[in-house]
């Protein structure tokens, strides 16, 4: 089965192609066009701007994701009218997609998998409407995909066969992204139960917001990791103690907004000279990163032990963090727990994980386009 995946849930325009045959995975392409530079000046993602950029970029990303041959196709008037209706809010995409269809062959794919949620609503709609338009033009079914399930299953891409991943189940999954921090019991692919989640900010959001306080660029996670790694020697006067919220609470929930407040207090009490100095920014970055890691490591390993599982699956943008990977692996090894991480390239948003998740949701494929809709707050 060959699936084309589309993800426009946040600030990456992503399209990928995957082939699965008897549980054997073949990655054909994984194209991501990032909008980071555009959103940077706002210190975060600006939804309507994200929508406009997706609309501009989707077709050029599509051309890179599939080796289309040139072919002349006719577009019937009735079909064009339906297409116009689907893309009523994306007039630029309508123009681009009709021109594209008329000059390119219909690809040899079995389905289109597209993220319908969770994510930024205006951004999600562009991806879904693009998928609907392609579905109509190419006569291929659509499979609606949950972005969080996509992240979780991105771990399969660390193996070449699905069965190697299945052998690690049941497991606990720790999903840590810009919008989510969840602990999930994964009994099987498709059988999930959320056992804990953040009560306020997500882990990635905490990286992003605290980075902004100390003057680092969006996205905050990689910026904080880089700044923290630059520390040469520890300056005693700059030793910063940050709280580890809910570290010992008996549930599996998280809370990161108190950490953000503590960072703000410390920042405000320093003189301008100190807080603008590299040693302060580096020490603070290291302290923030470590506080977040301590909570994630402790709570996720405790969940694995409580459930008497053997594996922990980590996914979402924060799973790209080197220190988290290193420390989690070390601590898990002491307890005989096996930790799975996705390949770095699919840790942050991508469409390969969406194409893959679509494969496991193939029963949900549909040709009745009106029924498929965006769900910005969709849960796993
Ligand atoms: O999964 P993702 O790409 O998008 C969402 O679905 O939200 O996650 C983005 C988040 C951002 O908050 C970003 O700061 C964080 O992942 N992130 C990192 C790293 N790379 C991305 N956080 C810590 N360390 C990293 N290396
Ligand atoms: Zn994501």
Image (cartoon, rainbow, N blue to C red):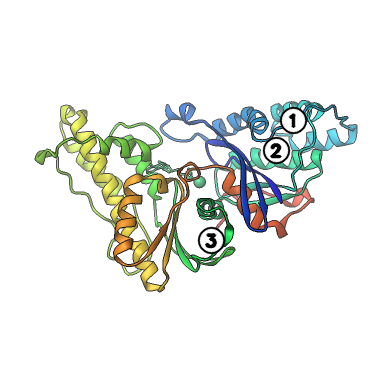
Is the C-beta separation of discs 2 and 3 under 8 Å? Answer: no
Location of the C terminus by quadrant is bottom right
Q: Depth check: give the residue in front, 174 or 106.
A: 106
Whether residue 320 is visible to the viewer of this picture, yes or no, is yes
Q: Position of residue 340 (x, y in %)?
A: 44, 56
Q: Is residue 255 left or right of residue 154?
A: left
Q: Is residue 93 left or right of residue 196?
A: right
SS for callout 1: helix
In primary-sequence order, the first of circles 2 and 3 is 2
Is the residue marked 3 within 8 Å of ligand 1, measured from its CB? no
Is the residue marked 1 within 8 Å of ligand 2, measured from its CB? no
Total tally of numbered discs in the picture = 3
In primary-sequence order, the first of circles 1 and 3 is 1
Q: Position of residue 373 (x, y in %)?
A: 68, 49
Q: Which mark is residue 239?
A: none
| Residue most extreme to the left | 236
Whether residue 275 is visible to the viewer of this picture, yes or no, is no
Q: Which residue in the structure is indicated by mark 3?
A: 164
Q: Which residue in the structure is indicated by mark 2?
A: 130
Residue drawn where x is 58% and y is 56% of the image:
161
In primary-sequence order, the first of circles 2 and 1 is 1
* Mark 2 neighbour class, 10 Å CA radius: few under 14, some 14 to 19, many 20 or more: many
CA gap between label 2 and label 1 equals: 8 Å
Q: Which mark's residue is nearer the viewer, 2 or 3?
A: 3
Is the C-beta separation of discs 2 and 1 under 8 Å? Answer: yes
State the image quarter where residue 72 is shown: top right
């Amino acid at each position: 089965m060959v699936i084309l995946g589309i993800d426009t849930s946040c600030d990456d325009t992503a399209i990928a192609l995957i082939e699965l045959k008897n549980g054997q995975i073949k990655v054909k392409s994984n194209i991501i066009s990032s909008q980071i530079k555009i959103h940077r000046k706002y210190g975060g993602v600006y939804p309507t701007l994200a929508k406009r950029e997706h609309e501009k970029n989707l077709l050029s990303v599509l051309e890179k994701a599939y080796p289309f041959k040139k072919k002349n196709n006719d577009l019937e008037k009735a079909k064009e009218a339906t297409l116009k209706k689907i893309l009523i809010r994306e007039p630029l995409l309508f123009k681009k997609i009709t021109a594209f269809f008329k000059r390119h062959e219909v690809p040899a794919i079995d389905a289109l998998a597209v993220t319908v949620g969770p994510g930024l609503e205006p951004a999600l709609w562009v991806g879904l409407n693009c998928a609907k338009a392609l579905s109509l033009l190419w006569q291929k079914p659509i499979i609606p995909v949950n972005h969080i399930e996509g992240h979780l299953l991105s771990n399969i891409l660390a193996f070449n066969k699905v069965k190697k991943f299945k052998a690690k189940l049941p497991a606990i999954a720790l999903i840590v992204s810009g919008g989510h921090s969840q602990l999930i019991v994964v009994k099987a692919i498709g059988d999930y139960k959320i056992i804990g989640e953040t009560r306020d900010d997500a882990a990635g959001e905490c990286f992003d917001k605290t980075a902004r306080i100390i003057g680092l660029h969006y996205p905050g996670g990689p910026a904080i990791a880089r700044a923290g790694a630059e520390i040469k020697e520890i300056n005693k006067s700059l030793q910063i103690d940050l709280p580890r919220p809910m570290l010992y609470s008996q549930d599996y929930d998280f809370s990161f907004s108190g950490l953000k407040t503590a960072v703000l207090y410390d920042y405000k009490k320093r003189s301008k000279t100190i807080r603008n100095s590299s040693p302060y920014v580096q020490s603070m970055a290291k302290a923030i990163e470590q506080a977040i890691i301590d909570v994630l490591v402790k709570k996720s390993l405790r969940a694995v032990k409580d459930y008497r599982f053997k594996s922990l699956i980590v996914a979402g943008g924060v799973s790209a963090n080197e220190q988290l990977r290193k420390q989690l692996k070390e601590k898990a090894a002491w307890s005989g727990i096996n930790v799975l991480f996705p390949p770095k390239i699919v840790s942050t948003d991508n469409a390969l994980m969406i194409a893959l998740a679509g494969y496991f949701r193939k029963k949900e494929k549909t040709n009745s386009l009106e029924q498929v809709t965006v769900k910005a707050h969709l849960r796993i």
